[in-house]
Image (cartoon, rainbow, N blue to C red):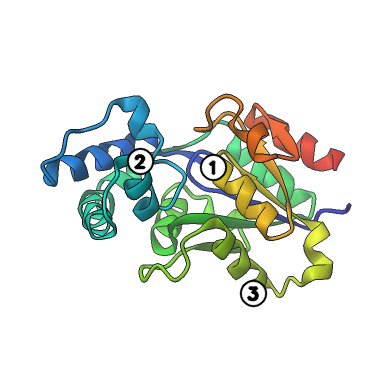
Amino acid sequence: MALKYILFDLDGTLTNSSEGITNCISYAFSEMGREVPSHSELLEYIGPPLVSAFQELAGFTHDEALEAVEKFRKRYDDIGLFENKPYNNIEEVLIELNNMDKKLIVATSKPEYLAGKILDHFGLSRYFAEIVGSTPDEKRVSKKEVIMEVFHRLNIGDADKKNVIMIGDRKYDILGAHDCGLKAIGVYYGFAEKGELEEAGADYIVYEVSDIPKTIRSI
């Protein structure tokens, strides 16, 4: 398999966004008069689409989840998105992959306009051919839907899927990739719990950022 396209998740894969996301989840709970979860519970909100996360993790109704996301965005869009930092060595890895003539794409469940702002802020946008995220109207939210949009924008057909791989830190990245007919690399320097990536069926496992190019070469 000669990989041509490499899809990267954002939170937990390119940047450590835990401070901003957990602060804003806490803010949303407080604003809604709810008890704020523990820090370990707050970390579970990193990865899945937020509306789904509030329903599945907090037991909110759909309307309550929408309200919680609105509260989250109130703080996140101006403050939380920059309570964030790229992982050590990630820029060097992106440079190396570009030098290997790989086409890099961001595929995130984060709203696309916010993903672009974050990557611009840290000077990482230049390494990506495309940045694809969710839409405000929730018509594109799940990782499967985001990856399908990547296929659309880059004219990637079924015959090309063998040349595409997804890299992410949560089960949602692995499952979304498999739903789209792709293999996936799970990274354990992000927010996955022990065993999560294997249980989701990750095809390859990476423990350090600097191991990504070596893994890509081995495929």
Which one is earlier in the sequence, the residue at label 3 or at label 2? 2
Q: Label 3 is placed on what type of residue?
A: His
Judging by the rendered image, the residue that carries numbered circle 3 is 152
Foreground residue, 139 or 199? 199
Instruction: Say which element carries label 2.
Output: helix
Query: What is the C-alpha distance between the residues marked 3 and 1?
Result: 23 Å
Q: Kindly indicate whether the residue at mark 1 contacts the one at mark 2 (C-beta within 8 angstroms).
A: no
Q: Quadrant of the C terminus?
A: top right
Q: Which residue is mark 2?
A: 57
Q: Quadrant of residue 23?
A: top left
Quarter of image, res 16: top left
Inspect the image, locate mark 2, and give the three-letter code of the amino acid beneath it: Leu
Q: CA distance from mark 2 to mark 1?
A: 24 Å
User: Is disc 1 placed on a helix, strand or loop?
Assistant: loop
Query: What residue is rendered at 64% in x and 74% in y?
Result: 152
Label 3 Cα neighbours within 10 Å, binned few <14 / some 14-19 / many ≥20:
few
Q: Residue at x 37, y 45 (%)?
A: 56
**Which residue is labeled 1 in the image?**
14
Q: Position of residue 6 (x, y in %)?
A: 70, 53
